[in-house]
Image: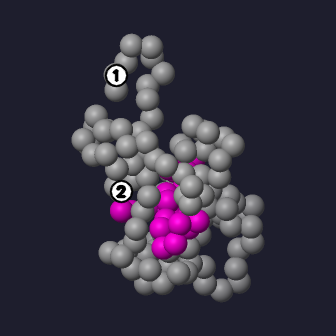
Amino acid sequence: MPEDDSNCVICRGGKSTKRNLILFCDGEDCNLPVHQDCYGIDEVPDGSWYCERCEDGVLPSETRIVCCPKLTGALKRTTAPTRYMHVVCAAWSKNIDSTEDPYNFNNQELDKQTCYICGRKQGLCVQCEHTFCTK
């Protein structure tokens, strides 16, 4: 069982209050710590709480994540069947085009730029705002 001061994997904050608790997923081998507000949990359940991946019964090894090669973190369902997106990646996506629901991937094309850090074409690349930057 994690300690009460474990940090939220979304905001990295460790403070838990009565109005914004840090909850831990009760899924087998998950134990994901998230703030109630960060993950969008309106009401804290009386019993067990499960993140959306665990609620769907999807194993970590079978999880299909859009926009990011990272396999761990707080995931939410997308509109694409059996696909998930990190809450943090969704925040980036929403900042890029605030008119779109970041979890709606039925008609959304991802820009497949090559990431200069990891060299992959998987994910959501954000162009630097500096006029002459190529990264």
**Measuring 53% from the left and 43% from the top, which residue is drawn there?**
92
Q: Position of residue 48 (x, y in %)?
A: 61, 84
Q: Nearer the viewer, residue 88 or 123?
A: 123
- Queried whether the magenta region covers residue 112, the answer comes back as no
Q: Nearer the viewer, residue 40 or 114?
A: 114
| Apparent side of residue 43 relative to residue 83 in the rendered image (left or right) | right
Secondary structure found at label 1: loop
Secondary structure found at label 2: loop
Q: Which residue is mark 2?
A: 70
Instruction: Please state which amino acid type lies under the numbered disc 2.
Output: Lys
Instruction: Please state which amino acid type lies under the numbered disc 1.
Output: Thr
Q: Which label belongs to residue 116?
A: none
Q: Quadrant of residue 98?
A: top right
**Measuring 36% from the left and 62% from the top, which residue is drawn there?**
71
Q: Residue furthest top?
A: 132
Is the residue 51 above or below the residue 115 in the image?
A: below
**Measuring 39% from the left and 53% from the top, which residue is drawn there?**
68
Is the residue 101 above or below the residue 81 in the image?
A: above
